Image: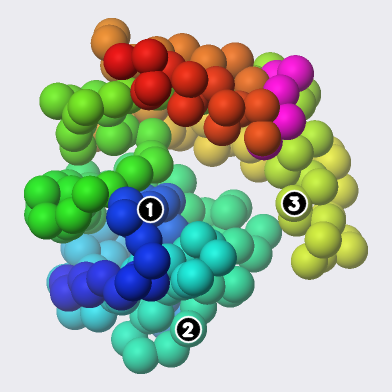
């Protein structure tokens, strides 16, 4: 698998959402009607995938899959429903681990993911574990998806989020868990601006 980076000349740090990588692989697998239980076929597909991921000038993620922009497609409820099934495959995660580390070693980077502080970069300069009460997470996710999908319901979002948490927390390879030295921040009652402020205060205070 090939992965490239592109970003605005104004950026000092690049931002990498590793979830976008697994979402992109899920999109390709579904588009090609690959059985998501066929680990060998999925790993083979992964090795033959060209993925360019970077930041637009506004900081948002831009993802190019085999030459086409899929930035919006990977955020659909269909992808959300199946992404954990792809992300739990050990062979795929091992390939992504090497790529993520290589990117991190070559750039100043802010990287987000469910195993970043425990597996990908256990010696990161700063590690944060952002959390929120489950009902608040459902509310936020529903609001996000409702903007692009009028058929989505809170019940569907709740079931999907609960299922993803279960799969990601119990998978054998790189499960979701808080790193022992990660700084825990409960964002339940915070706005985005307040959450960012909490992160910056911690960083600035050393």
Residue drawn at (20%, 29%), measured in percent from left and top?
124
- Binning the other alpha carbons within 10 Å of mark 3 as few (below 14), some (14 to 19) or many (20 upward) gives few
Q: Give the residue at the far top of this rendering.
A: 180
Q: Quadrant of the N terminus?
A: bottom left
- Between disc 2 and disc 1, the foreground one is 1
Residue 97 at x, y percent in the picture: 17, 47
Disc 2 or 3, which lies upstream in sequence?
Answer: 2
- Up/down of 108 relative to 161, above or below: below
Q: CA distance from mark 2 to mark 1?
A: 18 Å
Q: Nearer the viewer, residue 84 or 109?
A: 109
Identify the residue position indicated by label 1 in the image.
Answer: 15
- Up/down of 131 relative to 139, above or below: above
Q: Residue 69: give its label.
A: 2
**Res 137 quadrant in image:** top right
Disc 2 or 1, which lies upstream in sequence?
Answer: 1
Task: Confirm or deny contact between disc 2 and disc 1 (CB under 8 A).
Answer: no
Identify the residue position indicated by label 3 in the image.
Answer: 144
Residue 82 part of the magenta-drawn span? no
Q: CA distance from mark 1 to mark 3?
A: 20 Å
Asked which secondary structure carries label 1, the reply is strand
- Magenta residues span 188-192
């Amino acid at each position: 698998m090939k992965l490239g980076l592109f970003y605005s000349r104004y950026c000092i740090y690049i931002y990498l959402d590793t979830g976008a990588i697994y979402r992109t692989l899920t999109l390709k697998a579904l588009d090609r009607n690959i059985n998501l239980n066929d680990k060998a076929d999925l790993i083979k597909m992964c090795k033959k995938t060209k993925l360019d991921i970077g930041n637009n000038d506004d900081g948002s993620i831009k993802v190019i899959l085999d030459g086409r922009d899929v930035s919006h497609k990977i955020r659909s409820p269909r992808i959300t429903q199946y992404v954990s099934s792809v992300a739990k495959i050990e062979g795929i995660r091992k390939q992504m681990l090497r790529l993520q580390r290589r990117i991190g070693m070559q750039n100043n980077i802010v990287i987000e993911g469910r195993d970043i502080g425990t597996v990908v970069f256990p010696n990161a300069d700063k590690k944060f574990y952002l959390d929120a009460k489950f009902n608040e997470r459902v509310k936020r996710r529903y609001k996000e998806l409702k903007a692009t999908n009028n058929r989505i319901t809170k019940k569907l979002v709740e079931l999907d989020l609960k299922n993803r948490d279960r799969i990601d927390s119990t998978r054998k390879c790189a499960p979701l868990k808080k790193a022992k030295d990660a700084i825990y921040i409960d964002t339940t009652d915070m706005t985005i601006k307040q959450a960012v402020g909490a992160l910056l205060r911690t960083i600035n205070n050393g």
